[in-house]
Image (cartoon, grey):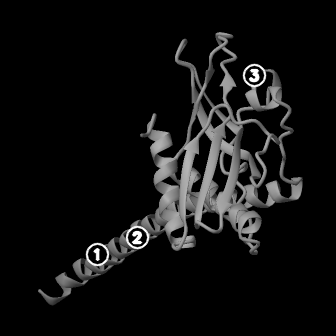
Amino acid sequence: MCTSLTTCEWKKVFYEKMEVAKPADSWELIIDPNLKPSELTPGWKQYVEQHASGRFHCSWCWHTWQSAHVVILFHMHLDRARRMGSVRMRVFKQLCYECGTAREDESSMLEENIEGLVDNLITSLREQCYDEDGGQYRIHVASRPDSGPHRTEFCEACQEGIVHWKPSKKLLEEEVTAHTFSEASKPRAQSGSGYNFLSLRWCLFWASLCLLVVYLQFSFRSPAFL
């Protein structure tokens, strides 16, 4: 049973993608808030998503904030004989820095972000549980502007010793450049339409002027025929 809309979305996306990736195996996704990094049961594997993007909402003072430093911990196990797999998942929380409450609030994520994160999870599953080439991991940290430097004293993952991974400066610059290029194309399209409109106005002006000249010439010539 889902405890929140975000949890339901995680399970929905995971089950749909695993049905395509590994239709012969049965996988389950379990939300486990007590999951600990590097504390693995024999036979289990670990994957840490260290650069997810999410929005937090304080249930005490109603403050909301965006973070590009959301950490998600996964523990994975595949029973090859029974063709059954299990993934345990924990999204680390952040404290509200406005009211200083001790309550750590859960993050919510957009559907497109969840789909990309599940793709990364399946890539890790292929590599660690199936000994396959999982492919390339997707980067999410530059998809949205960050609100500022990460405050480790308010981060549950940092307090438990998880060192956040940061993409290289070159990778971030490439993603920001691509994002800027796509955004810059919109104003150019608008300015282009303005230029066309201005050209139409000038065409009408010159056409009217030509008609006026022809009319005046005809007016001056007409008495000669009387």
x, y (%) of residue 123?
69, 65
Instruction: Give the residue number, with chain letter if any, for mark 3.
Output: 154
| Type of the residue with mark 3 | Phe
- What is the secondary structure assignment of the residue under circle 2? helix
Task: Give the labeled residue for mark 2.
Answer: 200
Give the mark toward the camera: 1 or 2: 2
> Which label belongs to residue 120?
none
- Report crowding for label 3: few under 14, some 14 to 19, many 20 or more residues within 10 A (C-alpha): some
Q: Which residue is mark 1?
A: 216
Query: Disc 2 and disc 3: Cα gap in Å?
Result: 59 Å
- Position of 101 with respect to 133 (left or right) is left
Mark 2 vs mark 3: give the one in front: 3
Specify the quadrant of the image occupied by residue 216. bottom left
Disc 2 marks a residue whose amino acid type is Leu
Q: Position of residue 5 (x, y in %)?
A: 44, 39
Looking at the rendered structure, the secondary structure element under dot 1 is helix
Q: Are the two marked residues, 1 and 3, in contact with CB atoms closer than 8 angstroms?
A: no
For disc 1, the neighbor class at 10 Å (few under 14, some 14 to 19, many from 20) is few
Q: Does dot 3 land on a helix, a strand or a loop? A: helix
Q: Position of residue 215 (x, y in %)?
A: 26, 77
- Quadrant assignment for the N terminus: top left
